[in-house]
Image (spheres, grey):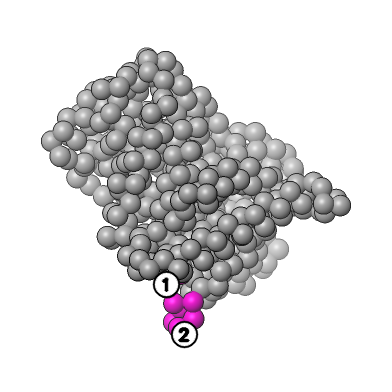
Amino acid sequence: MTTGIHPDAVLPDGPTSPRMVQTLAYAAARRGTLRKMRDRYGSAFTFGSYILGPMVMLSDPGEVRELFQANSEQAETPDSNLGFVLGPGSLFSITGKEHRRQRKLLTPPFHGRRLRAHEALIEQETRREAASWPEGKPFPVLPSTMRLSMNVILRAVFGADGAELDELRTMLPPMLKVGAFVASLPIARVDLGGRGPGARFDRYRAQYDAIIDRLIDQAGADPKLTERDDVLAILIQSRYDDGSPMRRSEIADQLLTLLAAGQENTARTLAWAVERLRRHPELVRRLVTEDEEGGSELREATLIEVQRIRPVVEMTARQVRAESLRIGRWTLPRGTVATACISLLHENESLFPRPEVFDPDRFVGARPDPSWIPFGGGVRRCIGAAFATMQMNVVLRTMLRDFTLVPTLEPGEHHPDHGISVAPAKGGLAVLHRR
C-alpha cells in the first residue's frame, strides 16, 4: 500500500515510474495499460496522471458501488473544460444541489409513454438513412449511425424541423469537433484577434444559441405545445420547486449536453453491434426469427452484451471533495480522482463467465449484474440511457427487418484504446442485401 501526503491516506500500490511516462503509456494504449496494471497490482491500483496527479483505478465491484454511492459533498465529477463547450448550465458543469435541481426536470422526458412516442420517428430516420446504403459492397456503418443518431436527437430532443433542423445538423458536427479540441487544449481558447479555435467555437456557439432561441419562440407559440413529446417542449413547460421556469440558457446548455453525450456513444455502439453480428450468423438468424414471432428478448440481450464486451466509454471518475473518503480498503485524500474502470469490470470472470466470448444468451431472461455500467452509475449515470437503449433497439430491429447482413470470417475489428470513446477500427464494416 502507498500512503499519500495526508496522514490518514491509504492508496493502492501502483507503478513508480515518472508521471509523464505513465501518462504517455496510458495515452498510447489505454486498455492494454490498465490490464497490465490490474494483472500486477490487483483490482485497485494508483496511476500517476501528469495532469490530475494520483488516480485510483477501481475494478472491484463492491468498491465501485461505494464510489457511486458517495454523495456530492464527498465526491463529484472532476473539474473539466466541458463547461466552456457545453455551457455553465450543462449537467457536466453543475454540481450538488443545482445538479439535482436540473436533473429532476430532465428525467421525465426519458421515461414511459414519452419515451415510446419516439419509436416511429426512429424507424423513419433509420429507413431514410439506409436508403443510401450500397448493396453487396462493404461500407462502414459508423458514419451512417452518426448521422442517424444526430437526426433522431435533433427531432426527438430539440424538436427541430425545417430550416432549424437543416441548420443544426450542418453546424453542430464542426462545432462539436472544434469544442472537443478546445476542451482538451485550454490554451486554444486564447482570442487571437477573432481567430483561432476558441474564437471559431464562440461564433458557432452564438449561432447555436440563436437557433435555440427561435425553436423556443416557435414552441411557445405552438397551440399544441402540451401535446408535444420532444424534450425541448417538455422543458419549456417544466417548473422548478419554486415555480420558476428553466432559463433559455439552461435549456440551450442541456440540449447540447444531451446531444454531445448521446449521439456519438449511441452511434458507436450500433457500429459495434454490426461488427459483432457479422461474425455470428446463427445469432442473426435467431434474431430475425424472434422478430418475426413478435419477440424482442434476444435483441435486447444482444445490445446489452455488445455494451459489455465493447463499452464505448471505458471509465468514469469522481474527485474527492471531502477531507478524505473511505472506499473499501482505501482512504482517499481530498483531490484524489477515483475511477471506475468499466472495461475491467466487464471483463471480470466472476461476474461474467468467459468474458472474452460474445454471448448474448448470458442476458436472456436475466438482468445484468449491477457491475454492468456502460452508462456509468450513481447520480451521474447518463440521464439519456433509456432513450439510447430504445433507439438502439429500434434501429437494430429495423435493419434486420429490411436487410440481410452478410457474415464474414475476417477477424474482429480492432478496438483502438485511445481517445475518449472507442469505435471499431474500420467503422463497423458491413455488407448488406435488401430483403
C-beta proximity under 8 Å, tags 1 and 2:
no
On screen, residue 6 above or below 425? below
Mark 1 lies on a secondary structure that is helix
Tell me the number on the disc at residue 403: none
Q: Residue at x 21, y 30 (%)?
A: 288
Mark 2 lies on a secondary structure that is loop
Place of residue 368 in the rendered image (x, y in percent of width and height, measured from the top left): 30, 48
Q: Is residue 400 left or right of residue 2?
A: left
Place of residue 341 in the rendered image (x, y in percent of width and height, measured from the top left): 50, 47
Q: Residue furthest right?
A: 193
On screen, residue 24 above or below 67? above
Q: Residue furthest left?
A: 293
Tell me the number on the disc at residue 237: 1
In the depicted view, which residue is nearer to us: 313 or 318? 313
Q: Residue at x 49, y 28 (%)?
A: 427
Q: Residue at x 46, y 21 (%)?
A: 139
> Is most of the magenta stretch helix, strand or loop?
loop
- Residue wearing tag 2: 242
Q: Residue at x 27, y 60 (%)?
A: 113
Magenta part of the protein: which range?
A: 236-245
Name which quarter of the figure residue 307 lies in: top left
Quadrant of the image for the C terminus? top left
Q: Could you tell me how far apart the alpha carbons at marks 1 and 2 are, in whole angstroms? A: 14 Å
* Residue 206 on the magenta segment: no
Residue 245 seen by the camera:
yes
| Residue type indicated by callout 1 | Gln
Place of residue 331 in the rendered image (x, y in percent of width and height, measured from the top left): 56, 64
In the depicted view, which residue is nearer to us: 60 or 294? 294
Circle 2 Cα neighbour tier, 10 Å, few/some/many (<14 / 14–19 / ≥20) = few
